[in-house]
Image: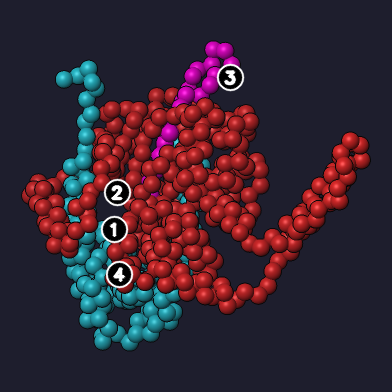
Chain colours: A red, B cyan
Amino acid sequence: MGYVAVKGGSDAIHHAGELVEFYRVKEGTTPLEVAQISAQLRLAVDKVIGEGGLYAPEYAAIALKQAEGEVFEAAFILRAFITTLERRYYAEPIQTREMFIRRKISASFREIPGGQVLGPTRDYTQRIMDTAKVNETLEDMKAFLQKFESRLDKNHLQEVTTYAKVIDLLKREGLLQSVAGDEDRTLKDITREAIRFPAPRSARLQMMSRAETGGLMALGYSSMRGFGSDHPTVAELRYGTVPLRIKDPGGRIRYVGKIAVTEAEMISMKKQSKKGEAPLYGIGYGLCFGQNDTKAICMGILDRTMRAPDPSSPPNDQEFVLYHTEGIESMGFTNHLKLPHYVTFQAGLNNVRAAVKRSTQNVVTSAPTVTTQPAVTP
Amino acid sequence: MIDVDFILCECNLEALKSFVESLEGIYQTLVSRDPSLCTVMIPAEDSVEGQPFYLGEALVTECEVVLQGQVGFGICLGDEPVRCYCIAFLDAALQLNDAHYDRIMQFLKEQDALVTQAHVVEYNHIQRTKVDFKLMEQD
């Protein structure tokens, strides 16, 4: 039996929406400014733009406010917002080698070009509750900024520079595995053409770049725990901004702004398929909007696992990984379970009642020592 | 060689707006296409194999302005109607290459210096987080 929809309920749905708003505002607190959300909930905004698939931090902040901080819902709102807009341009490919580096680390090499730069991170710190945040004032923030600015000797500043990548060093040494000749390298756009399996790598990377962080982490972690084929090391993890350029209607290449991205190159040794074959390294690649180490790292892990010849483990199976890490779809399907299934459930219920009745009668007829009782219908 | 669009996208919006307002009376101005929102799809490449793929879309604002018959086009990231109009205005004004060209270039140079300085300061703050971990066996 197919799903039978319901109708009506408009008033109750409208009132439920009002009740949501009531619980958001009833305490009479100061309304959150969108600029505050953008600045002070930066990492939540980054998740929303990454999972919504639209680089629009100011709109992601509005969505977060509207969704009361629920990142799934905010990403859903952002993705719905995209459909109201015309896509008029395709940018020039971004070049992460041009990145203005805010963070750049390697877990594989201690010495990397330009050194290890921790950048804005809570790594290596204890997660102790900072209760002083309760009484934070604007003056506290200004005082911090003043102190922070005073740390620099403005007369001795280094010039901004870009850095060679760790993987370039390995490439030059000939230690990286070359691309398999049978790899499908076509460029697909999964927002215009539904994904089909086996999917080309471009489609897999696109889907993961807008996948849900927790989903990618769960499957990436499962691979490292032995349920997949890869347990790599971070060759290089970068976070920073890259310039975005487009060709305008007159054909000129124009700078339009900078976007913040996190990039991970995950390195692991390739299993030797033939005896005597050189044990080369393979790289898994992760790239996503905003600052999100976990997402980029796990994308890099799953990029590798989905290229494994044996798809029997979940992280190695393209369909398993890509469908189940797609946050909007997963959330939508999960939440559809709340929609009325009255007719389908009642049909099943009738069948179960009939089967129970039959089995009761069978038991009665095949057990002559028991006194017969009429079947009870609820 | 300065990148005009880079400066106009990155400079202080109030400074840009004031400067363009100071030029508006000079030219016969027509906004031929009001600022409007659209998206741009962003291609990226895997840094090892050069595999192209689409990273996601970005929200941009675009606008077209005609000054003395010269068309100027502006586009920038985000919902930025004022900045976008200013970029289109100055794009047209620079293409006119008239008596105000040097004044515009002077403004751009000043803003370029400010943007560059802000980048240098941020970069140096970031460099303070550079780390040189020692192995446990080392002193």
Q: Which label is found at residue A100?
A: 2
Residue stretch rendered in magenta on the structure: A260-281
Indicate left or right for B73 with A282 as reference: left
What is the spatial separation of the Cα atoms under label 1 and label 4, in whole angstroms? 17 Å
Mark toward the start of the polypeptide (1 vs 2): 1
Give, as a three-letter code, the residue at label 4.
Answer: Thr
Can residue B42 be seen at all in this image of the molecule? Answer: no
- Magenta segment includes A111: no
Q: Do discs 1 and 2 share a chain?
A: yes
Tell me if mark 4 has few (under 14), some (14-19) or many (20+) residues whose alpha carbon lies within 10 angstroms of its own. Answer: few
User: Is A274 placed above or below B92 here?
Assistant: above
The residue marked by circle 3 belongs to what chain?
A
What is the spatial separation of the Cα atoms under label 3 and label 2, in whole angstroms? 40 Å
**Camera-side residue of A275 and A293:** A293
What is the spatial separation of the Cα atoms under label 1 and label 2, in whole angstroms? 22 Å
Give, as a three-letter code, the residue at label 3.
Answer: Ser
